[in-house]
Amino acid sequence: MQPTYYERLLADERCGLATILDEDIARLRTLGSSEIPALQHPTFAQCRGRYVKGAVDQFKQFLASSMSAEQFQRFQQTPSYHEALVQKATQQYWIYETFLYLRASGERTLHLGAEVCHELLAAPLEICGGDFHLRVPATMLVFDSAELVDAFYAGERRTGPGRHHHEAPLCVLALELSANSQSRGRHLKVVSVHGDNEQDYRVELRQLFLADKLLLEDTLDVAEQDSWQGSAEVEHLLGLPAPRLVWASRQADSGFHAAKTAYYRVVLGALHCAETAPHRLSWHPSQPLNGTHSTLAFNELLPSGR
């Protein structure tokens, strides 16, 4: 398995995310339970907000250093600047949550090759949301499949460079959220990143509503209304007017349409198979540090015929 987006970002000393996560996990576990509290807990929100604000401040410094002071002053008055800030803040908001839960729950990782991805692409999700559960709050999926890369970019109006990098893996972090007073049921947060050691070609964020009596296949067609969460907190962190935030957040969310159904079918199908068909999992222990291979221990999901 190639090095994952999770490992690359934690190894980046400029953002210091690994240290931040370890310190926050230790702090959150002192609240009276060994379990990490819900996302709505005030202390969790405080930790997340501090990280997101720091990441956005670093991003502002990067933008300022890439142009003259006069150019940066003019750029700050444009919609493009506000859109860039919202995209950065939104991604970091979701990355903090998924990374923290993944790290706190043992970095559960699942690798899927081309053959099993082809199988899942052709298999409709004939289970209801009530039958879909993760054993731990967060799981990471790593896909090595040219066919799935094509599905990830399906429906895009602009041809991004990543579409032509079929050798680059797709890294997906999935976080299951329990029902609470602020939601109407369970949700699954999904962060998808297509990239390699050279660059990240595309990042997509999606939140899926897990309705107890609705087939997962049908969930993919109605999930648009649940795709954007946390806008109020991001608005507060950035100090942007609400109408501007709503417009920019839609750009960050990338839009969900029928063309993406096949891609998310594989993501949900892989997670479900890992829980319900453990005999198809092949364990790979962690490896020494190597620039061409992941150091994480992981399970390989095998095709159904093996």
Image (spheres, rainbow, N blue to C red):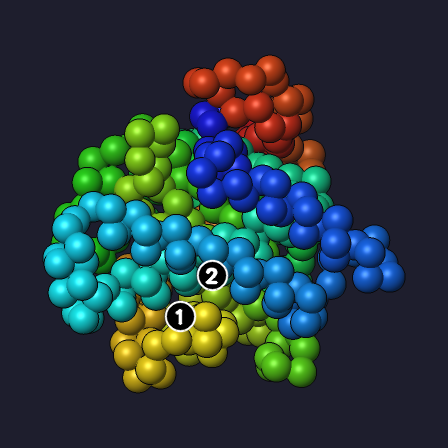
Query: Image height check: is 129 above or below 118?
Result: below
Q: On the picture, is 117 further left or further right than 300?
A: left
Describe the element under mark 2 as helix, strand or loop. helix
Query: Image height check: is 254 above or below 233?
Result: above
Q: Is the Cβ of the residue at disc 2 closer than 8 Å to that at disc 1?
A: no
Return the residue nearer the eye: 202 or 267.
202
Q: Mark 2: give few (<14), some (14-19) or many (20+) Cα within 10 Å.
A: some
Q: Which residue is mark 2?
A: 53
Q: Residue at horizontal 40%, vertical 57%?
A: 56
Which of the labelled discs sits on residue 238, or is there none?
1
Q: On the picture, is 177 further left or further right than 123?
A: right
Query: Image height check: is 130 above or below 132?
Result: below
- Residue 245 sits in which quadrant? bottom left
Q: Quadrant of the C terminus?
A: top right
Q: Residue at horizontal 46%, vertical 35%?
A: 12
> Residue 272 at x, y = what percent?
60, 51
Can see residue 282?
no
Which of the labelled discs sits on residue 65, or is there none?
none
Q: Residue at horizontal 44%, vertical 18%?
A: 292
> Residue 270 at x, y = what percent?
54, 46
Three-letter code for the amino acid on which mark 2 is drawn: Lys
Three-letter code for the amino acid on which mark 1 is drawn: Leu
Q: Mark 1: give few (<14), some (14-19) or many (20+) Cα within 10 Å.
A: some
> Residue 11 at x, y = what percent?
50, 32
Query: Image height check: is 236 above or below 281?
Result: below
Return the residue nearer the eye: 213 or 143.
143
Can see residue 232?
yes
Whichever of labels 2 and 1 marks the residue nearer the N terminus, that label is 2
